[in-house]
Amino acid sequence: MRANLFSTPLDTTLTLFALGLAYVVLAPAIQWLIVDAHWRGTMPADCPDKGAACWPFIRARWDQFIFGLYPQAERWRILLGAGIGIIAALPLFMPRFRYKGWLMCLLFILYAGIGKILFVGGVFGLAYVDTGNWGGFFLTIVTAVFVLATALPLAVMLTLGRESSLPLLRLCCSAWLEFWRSVPALVVLFVAIIMFPLFMPPGLEVDKLLRALLALTILMSCYLSEALRGALQAIPPGQYEAADSLGMNYWQKTFLVILPQAIPTALPQITSNFIGLFKETTVLLIIGLYDLLGMVQSAASDPVWLSPGVSATGYLFAALFYWVFCFGLSRYSAVLERRASRFRGKAI
């Protein structure tokens, strides 16, 4: 401590200033968050001090924060679908599992159908649940998983098209990317929700949530495509020449040599974009879809619970929820980066 914090008069001054600043900031926060906070109960009367943290509010509205307005009697379908997805995806996190690519393709095709049957219903005796009732953390996860699963393959195709030797294909992909990267996300959502139905034939209507998911997929695919394009440019020309010398055709060279090196290189930027997407699902509130933050805001506006302490507690809960999942994603990305670096080291 003496060497790092108090080695010189300037270091000592900065250390004491930092400690004083931390005390000024953290002491009131701990007082509000823990000491004066209300912990027991589930009713508004259990929070008599309107200026302190009100954790009974979180306990009382927990189901709403997780499931939104999904009918309570049907929430077992969400839990079943989540359980199936987690169990089916577990082999993807096993380093020695050899068929990850096939499993990902199988999950992409089958789980989408299983999720639609379970979550929407209307078949096999399951009650129909309109997507307008979806919300909370459930809607956040559905949005993030759907957009990532569809945007990444689309980004790969756009990147390959932009790097293609065919002038027309390269021009079309470049124009597509530059256009959508220049348009704000809110504008794209409003076009998908408000203007898109005007161009559809009479009687044909696309679900509002699906339109929003497709709009976010278009935007995210463009962002990921730029990350992949930068990774392709970082690959040494010798890799292309080595693949050509082995007699590989274009598709063999791309999927066996180039992309396996480009994707790990672009992984930090891909993770950053995905974390941004996970947080930006809150823009769905603009078009009337309530994700986790939207449900917190709606619940805090209830006149029964209305108070500064309740609102602050709800927003803090949402912030912690998002931080836990985003931090977990960043740590898992770091693990994948270390594995990729060890692989590249062995290859060299």
Image: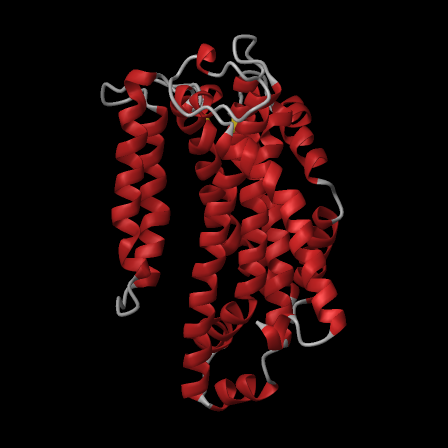
Residue 224 lies, with reference to residue 25, above or below; the image says below
Please give the name of the residue rendered at 46% of the width and 21% of the height, measured from the top-left corner.
57
Residue 214 lies, with reference to residue 54, above or below; the image says below
Residue 305, x across and y down, in percent = 53, 13
Q: Is residue 283 visible?
A: yes
Residue 47, x across and y down, in percent = 49, 16
Residue 121's image quarter?
A: top left
* Of residues 199 and 87, the one drawn nearer to the viewer in this rendering: 87
Residue 250 lies, with reference to residue 48, above or below; the image says below
Position of residue 344 in the picture relative to residue 77 (left or right): right
Please give the name of the residue rendered at 51% of the width and 75% of the height, measured from the top-left corner.
258
* Of residues 209 and 54, the one drawn nearer to the viewer in this rendering: 54
* Of residues 235 and 205, the one drawn nearer to the viewer in this rendering: 235
Position of residue 122 in the picture relative to residue 230 (left or right): left
Please give the name of the residue rendered at 26% of the width and 70% of the height, measured from the top-left corner.
96
Colour scheme shown: secondary structure
User: Number of numbered discs present?
Assistant: 0
Please give the name of the residue rendered at 61% of the width and 36% of the height, measured from the top-left corner.
28
Residue 218, x across and y down, in percent = 60, 45
Residue 265's image quarter?
A: bottom right
Residue 51's image quarter?
A: top right
Residue 345, x across and y down, in percent = 45, 86
* Of residues 317 and 86, the one drawn nearer to the viewer in this rendering: 317
Q: Is residue 289 visible?
A: no
Q: Which quadrant holds the N terminus?
A: bottom right
